Amino acid sequence: MCGIVAYTGCKEAYPILIKGLKRLEYRGYDSAGVSLAQNGTLSTYKQKGSVDQLDEFCMSKDRSGKTGIGHTRWATHGEPSTTNAHPHLSSDGRISIIHNGIIENYVYLREELTKRGYQFQSETDTEVLAHLIEDIYKNEGCSLEEAVRIALKNVVGAYALAILSADEPDQLILAKKGSPLLIGIGNNEYFIGSDGSPIVEYTRKVVYLEDGDVAVVSPQKGLTIKNIDDETTKRPYLQKLELNLEQLEKGGFEHFMLKEIFEQPRAIKDSMRGRLNVKKDIVELGGIREYEQKMLNARRIIIVACGTSWHAGTVGEYLFESIVRIPVEVEYASEFRYRNPLIYEDDIVIAISQSGETADTIAAVELAKSKGATVIGICNVVSSTLARITHAGSYTHAGPEIGVASTKAFTAQVTVLTLMALSLGRKKGTIPLSEYHKIISHLELIPQQVEETLKLNDDIKAIAKFFVEKRNAIYLGRGINFPVALEGALKLKEISYIHAEGYPSAEMKHGPIALIDEEMPVVVLATEQDTYEKTVSNIDEVISRKGRIISIVTKGDSVVKNKSTYCIEIPETLEILTPLLSCVPLQLLAYHVAVLRGCNVDKPRNLAKSVSVE
Ligand code: F6R
């Protein structure tokens, strides 16, 4: 949510900033802007819209300067516009600031600064910081770095900040609380990013700033890090950036989303690598080994997550309850954190997040930790906030997910949850050995079966035509495929803007059936064996109200297939593993519908990847 890039060194900053902004655009694409330090002044260029629009606008401008900052915005305070675009300037135009996060007490600060004569150009919360820092810098006679630290003591909220000043044009000041910020260390040069994507082609040596850090970087003076409240200098902790450049490219696919859907066999395999060995009869997640006993003794497990990760968590509920026989509660992180939940010291909280930066999930984790619970993370982005604040955890090795709609992260999360449940169930003795062996040998086949499912791409593209003019859709699933129905509906609505709802199949009679008519496509997941007849009855109920069935069935099915307007057959697996296959056609369906409707698949309106604000 908002992308930050900055550079200081011996190269021209502009090309580095623009390239970085293009990589970060998935974090927000309402507007973009840059500031460059040039001969004792700052030049700031901003545009509503994409980074390409900004780049085009800058073509006729002076783009020189060896220190600069750039920002791509997901609007929170103030509509998407050039005026509200970052960077924001101090009133004398000598301090420029970019920000990711939310300044919660900005109304108060704005009032106070207005009383002191400052005039505001934008509706943003960020602009108060530019004036506040300027006010302290001018009146306290301190260095800019000190002014930043004093200012931040008066700020309530979350931020990653990069600050450029005309007075010290070879230096950047950076600060972090709640939102991510990395410093890439080159040869007398520094590359700053909200994530590693704008940094990786220049250096792999990075420092992840911690909450409360204020850093100063300059080619002459190097890097120093202090705490907002504490003058003492902290030793930077150098880490290796784990990211490949190819992973950040589309690799011949039209969209990142399609590429990521097609990467799922590899992503699932990588999430199982070194953790599942069927021949040696091993299911082991090294990252949680130390806490496994605690997990086995837990009275209950609480899963916290948002969006697609919450859907994966809901699949996890079915997995854990059936395999480990521990009660599981799946909570929206945003609800959990604000309702004074009952959390006990022997609770295990599993937090799931692709980005590892989702503000509500992070806050839920902090809350659970403060009550003494053990928190296990499942996340995709290495060294993200979630990875750093949880007691232990397992990475999903899905690789960078750039498409705003989450796809491969979901299947990788479900894979890790399945492994976790199997490992615990085996140790707890809650799963018969024969059943355990059956599941692991079927699990091993999943990447290959996803590959097979992806071959249905052209058939699904043809089915997508049926949805193009529709305004609504219903997704039905039962048991472990109910969360998949929710996920399928979310995928369709977020990228094609067709209203879609997911329901447990049997719930349809309790209300949603009133919506069924000849215009309503009803996508039914009908792969489960135990309740197959019930699902067939639900399908009949839809058909008798003239609804049109698009079914996902197990290969060889004829009963549901014959009742369906369109039918997608997926390979046979155990019911407990079907989400890993059944979600794939739903991702492809949403993708093709959105493309046919002319929607911007990778950058759906109003959305951004990594929701690092509440
Ligand atoms: C939907 C989607 C979102 C995210 C949600 C949580 O396609 O991408 O619903 O799943 O914002 O994000 P993470 O997993 O990064 O915490």
Image (cartoon, helix red, strand yellow):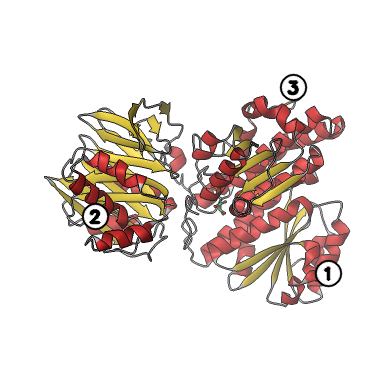
The answer to whether 118 appears left or right of 359 in the picture is: left
Image location of residue 460, percent across then percent down: 64, 59
Question: Which type of secondary structure does the marked residue at label 1 adopt?
Answer: helix
Q: Residues within 10 Å of mark 1 (few under 14, many from 20)?
A: some
Image side of residue 432 versus residue 21, left or right: right
Report which residue position mark 1 lands on: 540
Q: Can you tell which mark lies on residue 179?
A: none
Query: How many numbered tags mark residues here?
Result: 3
First-in-chain label (2 vs 3): 2
Q: Read off the residue under disc 3.
A: 280
Q: Which residue is mark 2?
A: 89
| Front residue of 495 and 163 | 163
Q: Position of residue 266 (x, y in %)?
A: 59, 38
Label 2 secondary element: strand
Can residue 267 be seen from the camera position used here? no
The answer to whether residue 157 of the structure is visible from this angle is yes
Mark 1–mark 2 CB contact (< 8 Å): no
Q: Please, what is the three-letter code of the amino acid marked with disc 3? A: Lys
N-terminal of the two: label 1 or label 2?
Answer: 2
Observer-nearest residue: 530 or 71? 71
Q: Position of residue 37 (x, y in %)?
A: 18, 45
Q: Nearer the viewer, mark 1 or mark 2?
A: 2
Residue at 31%, 56% (x, y): give it. Answer: 128
Amino acid type at circle 2 is: Leu
Q: Residue at x 37, y 27 (%)?
A: 236
Which label sits in the foreground, 2 or 3? Answer: 2
Residue 235 image point, x, y percent:
36, 25
